[in-house]
Image: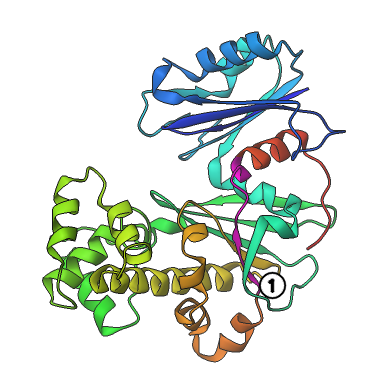
């Protein structure tokens, strides 16, 4: 019996898995509001009281870097420590990994219905796989084939220097770097970054800001959902919000192409996180792939790389189960 969990500052999802049922079919599953509990151990104890399984091992994906089995969770004052969790689980072995490693670990277990294809390309069997996941931040990871299975590896590539490709992006970089701070891809290619793009375009007259949108933004704790709705759901869409989304898509395409080059992701690139499933139409209008393939002499290689959006809503929990079950996988 494996206890697996997707641990975040907003919610924590736990499930019980077995090798026979596999990582996609939990025997029991529940989701808890993280901020209602003093620790992950408290949630685990409540879940196990409800389900009463005999746990042999556990694995957890957590938002943030994991150093020697220890991670601090954003938005809640928790420290997730594999040794402390092992004591809670009466000595069962515990593995704690970064949430992007968990998502990457799920990729070999995905089915066709769990993904939306942006570029069909040609999958090379056993080729490396890249994962780029814009959500609140920008997560990245990759997998390599070792001859028997795919192995997932963490990356903090989202914090690499933002490299603008167009005059608008060069102006955006200059505006964000005006105070001398580091401008990473995460600052322009994530939920944190969308307001930066919007503010730059607004302040430089790219399109007028509607009064209704200005009022909604002034009242919002988080401007990103407001901008996204204005671009995707409002009738008619706000041109300023639509231009913001267009720049975001182009920047995401460029960075996904960068990762594809760095790991030679001939097995494909997968877009995870909360944003890509919401903007599949925008990812297919040409801007993403134009930026993805705009790599000079290597553009032809990039155009042949498959690109998919992960649409499975529980992919991080599936991935945590894959980490814990450690089942052999097949080459892509």
Q: Which residue is drawn at the image coordinates 61% and 11% (left, top)?
A: 87
Judging from the image, the colouring scheme is rainbow
Work out which residue is located at the far right of the displayed protein and give it: 20
176 vs 203, nearest the viewer: 203
Horizontal and vertical percent for residue 145?
76, 58
Quadrant where the C terminus lies?
A: bottom right
Residue 163 quadrant: bottom left
Residue 38 quadrant: top left
Q: Which residue is drawn at the image coordinates 38% and 64% (left, top)?
A: 232
190 vs 202, nearest the viewer: 202
61 vs 81, nearest the viewer: 61
Q: Which residue is drawn at the image coordinates 68% and 78% (left, top)?
A: 121
Q: Residues within 10 Å of mark 1 (few under 14, many from 20)?
A: many
Residue 90 quadrant: top right
Asked whether 258 falls inside the magenta stretch, the response is no
Residue 70 seen: no
Horizontal and vertical percent for residue 237?
30, 69
Horizontal and vertical percent for residue 322?
72, 40
Quadrant where the N terminus lies?
A: top right
Position of 242 compared to 123: left or right? left
Q: Which residue is drawn at the image coordinates 80% and 52% (left, top)?
A: 149
Find disc 1 in the rendering and name its residue: 266
> Magenta residues?
306-316
Horizontal and vertical percent for residue 137?
39, 50
């Amino acid at each position: 019996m494996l206890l697996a969990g997707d641990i975040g500052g907003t919610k924590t999802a736990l499930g019980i898995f077995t090798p026979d049922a596999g990582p996609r079919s939990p025997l029991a599953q529940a989701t808890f509001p993280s901020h209602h509990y003093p620790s992950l151990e408290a949630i685990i104890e409540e879940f196990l009281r409800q389900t009463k399984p005999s746990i042999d091992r556990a694995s957890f994906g957590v938002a943030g870097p994991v150093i020697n089995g220890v991670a601090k969770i954003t938005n809640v004052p928790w420290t997730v420590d594999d040794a402390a969790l092992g004591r809670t689980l009466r000595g069962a072995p515990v593995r704690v990994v970064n949430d992007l490693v968990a998502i990457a670990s799920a990729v070999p277990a995905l089915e066709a219905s769990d993904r939306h294809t942006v570029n069909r390309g040609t999958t090379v069997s056993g080729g490396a796989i890249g994962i780029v996941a814009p959500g609140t931040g920008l997560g990245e990871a990759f997998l390599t084939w070792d001859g028997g299975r795919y192995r997932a590896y963490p990356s903090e590539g989202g914090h690499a220097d933002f490299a603008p490709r167009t005059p608008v992006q060069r102006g955006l970089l200059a505006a964000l770097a005006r105070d001398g701070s580091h401008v990473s891809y995460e600052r322009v290619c994530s939920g944190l970054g969308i307001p930066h793009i919007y503010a730059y375009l607004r302040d430089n007259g790219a399109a007028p800001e509607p009064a209704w949108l200005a009022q909604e933004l002034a009242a919002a704790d988080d401007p990103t959902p407001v901008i996204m709705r204005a671009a995707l759901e409002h009738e008619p869409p706000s041109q300023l919000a639509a231009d913001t989304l267009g720049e975001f898509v182009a920047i995401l395409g460029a960075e996904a192409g960068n990762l594809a080059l760095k790991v030679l992701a001939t097995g494909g690139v997968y877009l995870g996180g909360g944003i890509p499933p919401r903007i599949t139409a925008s990812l297919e209008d040409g801007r993403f792939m134009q930026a993805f393939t705009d790599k000079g002499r290597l553009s032809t290689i990039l155009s042949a790389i498959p690109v998919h959006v992960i649409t499975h809503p529980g992919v991080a929990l599936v991935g945590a189960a894959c980490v814990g079950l450690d089942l052999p996988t097949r080459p892509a």
